Image: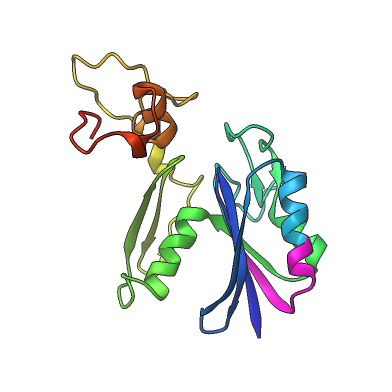
Amino acid sequence: MYFGGIEAGGTKFVYGITDKKGNLLEKFTCPTITPKETFTEIVDYFKVKDIKSLGIGSFGPVDLDPKSPTYGYITSTPKPHWENTNFANYFQKELNIPVAFDTDVNVAALGEITWGTAKGLDSCLYLTIGTGIGGGAIVNNTIIHGLTHPEMGHIQLPQHPDDNYVGFCPYHKNCFEGLASGPALANRWHMKAYKLPSDHKAW
């Protein structure tokens, strides 16, 4: 029995299949281009695999309310071409199998508490810092949702009085993501973060 998984990131998609014990059997990546181009490649892959269900962890914001008409959508993302994209329902229709859908960080937190460093615990917090910044939380074995997903990357941060950088986030400027994400660092220091020396004041 095999299961499919997709991690949808702002830069690339990672997808593949596992067995029921969570052992990764195949893994592939493709760039995050447009929904049509990216989805077509991944659907074509899964259509020739005998998978029983599909799990999706996506960049956001996403609609996680099963009662909402846009459940399973990527919603007001700043990622070009991806705003209001029907994600989960598209794959359910194309593959005709059950599809589970959540944020990439919640799925990562679930993976850690099931098989990873948080195994054996009932609560954990997972933070990711990269193209975007986000966090997923599990409390008492329950993934935290709510009215909307808690967008931890958009927490407002106080800045040093001498810091005049306005921030890179198109919505909040000087939030966590607007100040410390990869694109924010590149915009501020005019080079990719991985090229900044270890003693650079950015760190």
Quarter of the picture containing the N terminus is: bottom right
Closest to the observer: 30 or 113? 30
Image spot of residue 169 (x, y percent): 45, 26
Residue 171 is left or right of residue 137, and the answer is right
Give, as a single range, the part of the protein colored magenta.
Answer: 44-55
Residue at horizontal 51 percent and vertical 80 percent from the top? 23
| Res 155 visible | no
Image coords of residue 43 (percent x, y): 76, 61
Quadrant for the C terminus in the image: top left
> Residue 109's x, y, as percent?
41, 62
Res 96 quadrant in image = bottom right
Residue displayed at 33% across by 75% down: 119
Position of 104 relative to 25 (above/below): above
Q: Is residue 47 magenta?
A: yes
Q: Quadrant of residue 14?
A: bottom right
Instruction: Determine the residue positioned at 60% across, 53% down.
Output: 13
Q: Is residue 196 left or right of residue 10?
A: left
Name the spot of residue 76 as percent of width and height, x first: 60, 34
> Quick check: 52 left or right of 194?
right
The one of 121 and 79 positioned closer to us in this rendering: 79
Q: Is residue 97 above or below residue 178?
A: below
Q: Is residue 4 visible?
A: yes
Q: Residue at x 69, y 38 (%)?
A: 84
